[in-house]
Amino acid sequence: MKKINAIENSKITLPYNIIVILGKVIIGIFTSSFFMIINAFYSVGITSAKCLTLKTDLDIKNIKESNIYDKRMLAYNNYKTIGIIILVSSIFYTTYSVKNFFWPSNTEYSLIAGLVIAIVTFVELTISIIGIVLAKKRENVVYETMKLINLVSSFIALVLTQTALLSFSHTGDTSVYNGISGLIFGSLSIIVGVYMIVHSHFAVKGLELQYIRKSDIVI
């Protein structure tokens, strides 16, 4: 039986990611939850990042095997683009989380709605963790990209799961708890985005330098 890698796992789970986005938007509208809408937009960013990485993987496979330079440049350019997507999405998410400290907006769901959200986000979290594990032992830029996408996705899924569970299991305002977890995991996601941008910058510079040196030797 063929083992599923991180790329194939993302292809399989992509339809579920799209369904989750639609579900979040619907729940956000019907429960008047701006927090859920924010989560939906974050999921759009993450799903877009997965789609771009899947396309990059396909483009790399279409390049001649001997053209390692172009393959790696394409992979690192995508790495940087995904870093920017994660950074921008995480800044918006973290900003909203900080808002809870100054303008509390308690998120309340019924028992059934809360359980449904918790189950959906738990499955989303599980998919993200599986993606991280599958990419863990691969020394490949595309796999590394997918691993980091799944990592930040798991961060936000944890916050939403907590919010859903607290909404029906905790009496009183949970805004501060949601704000703290959103701030922590949102900040970690920002760090991941910055890391990807900086790392790709130096990696590209290193590749360009290697290419120049090889060109000098040929000449």
Image (cartoon, rainbow, N blue to C red):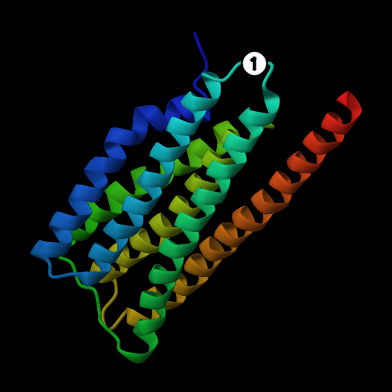
The answer to which quarter of the image holds residue 64 is top right
Residue 50: x and y in percent read 42, 40
Choose between 159 and 137: the one closer to the eye: 137
Choose between 69 and 99: the one closer to the eye: 69
Task: Please indicate, yes or no, whether residue 127 appears anywhere in the rendered image.
Answer: no
Residue located at (64% from left, 15% from top): 65
Which residue reaches farthest left?
30
- Dot 1 falls on a residue whose secondary structure is loop
Residue located at (84% from left, 30% from top): 214
Which residue reaches farthest top?
1
Instruction: Quickly name the residue at label 1.
Output: 65
Residue 110: x and y in percent read 15, 65
Residue located at (29% from left, 59% from top): 41
Which residue reaches farthest front?
219
Residue 166: x and y in percent read 31, 69
Q: Is residue 205 left or right of residue 48?
A: right
Choose between 208 and 30: the one closer to the eye: 208
Choose between 189 and 216: the one closer to the eye: 216
Q: In this view, does 191 lie to the left or right of 150?
A: right
Taking 137 as reference, is 161 above or below it? below
Taking 188 as reference, is 94 above or below it? below
Taking 101 as reference, is 45 above or below it? above
For the C terminus, the quadrant is top right
Residue 32: x and y in percent read 13, 70
Under mark 1, the amino acid is Glu
Task: Please indicate, yes or no, whether residue 111 appears anywhere in the rendered image.
Answer: yes
Q: How many marks?
A: 1
Within 10 angstroms of label 1, few (less than 14), some, or many (20 or more) residues?
A: few
Residue located at (32% from left, 67% from top): 163
Q: Is residue 129 left or right of residue 178?
A: right
